[in-house]
Image (tube, rainbow, N blue to C red):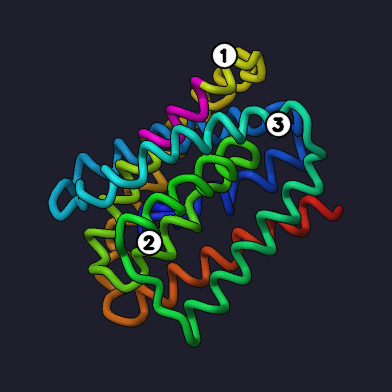
Amino acid sequence: MVQGTVGIGLGLVSAPVVTLLEPDLMPGLVLVLTTLLPLVTLLGERDDIDWRGLGWSMPTRLVGTAGGVWLVAVADDRVLGVAVGVMVLTAVALTAWAVVVPLNPGSLMTAGLLGGVAGTATSIGGPPFALLYQRRPPRQVRTTMAVYFTIGAGLSLVGLLLGGQLSWEQVRHALVLVPVLVVGALLAVPLRSRLTGPWFRYAVLAVCAASAGVLLVRSLA
């Protein structure tokens, strides 16, 4: 419901719960759901997608995915989670009060790279890209993020599969959760009209900050 409303947030809600209950299902379970949910969003909203921005960010997302697969294999999960969490919180603080990051090829490529690494390694890869689009119209944010998540999470799943780090159990449990995923997406529809203007931007920033906070707590605990 959160992601269906503001375009980001599935990892924020589900990743901590899955990590606490069944850590062996991470990050594959959340990545499968992250691939499927945007398709539901795009059934109702398909206009205003920023294809140009996606064209600049997706190639580096592929490079970041390879880096994320490597980090899953060799890096300590806690150190990686703390690093990503601190990075996102810093970006939220800067963009909320002072810094306006321009939406240009350089920033899009950087966001794609960081999102690929973080998304593959931690299942929370949306904040770098969402922060760039926080000042754009809500419909464009939701639809562009939907395409970004479907392609990006799909690349992460392929990378984990090739690296031998995606199991059938992760996929099976994700498929069991698809019906409630659809219900959440439908519940989000009436909420969209209530988040307009600056309130939408505040919601995006809040979800990004909460994602980073959850990742920090999860990594440190």
Q: Residues within 10 Å of mark 2 (few under 14, many from 20)?
A: many
Q: Residues within 10 Å of mark 3 (few under 14, many from 20)?
A: some
Q: Position of residue 146 (x, y in %)?
A: 32, 45
Q: Residue at x 62, y 28 (%)?
A: 69
Give above or below for 85 relative to 205: above
Q: Tell which circle, 1 or 2, labels the residue nearer the N-terminal end.
A: 2
Q: Which residue is mark 3?
A: 72
Q: Residues within 10 Å of mark 1 (few under 14, many from 20)?
A: few
Please state which amino acid type lies under the numbered disc 3.
Val
Please state which amino acid type lies under the numbered disc 1.
Leu
Q: Is residue 26 visible?
A: yes
Q: What is the spatial separation of the Cα atoms under label 3 and label 2, in whole angstroms?
A: 28 Å
Q: Tell which circle, 3 or 2, labels the residue nearer the N-terminal end.
A: 2
Q: Which residue is mark 1?
A: 162
Q: Nearer the viewer, mark 3 or mark 2?
A: 3
Q: Secondary structure at mark 1?
A: helix
Residues drawn in magenta: 151-158
Dominant secondary structure, magenta: helix
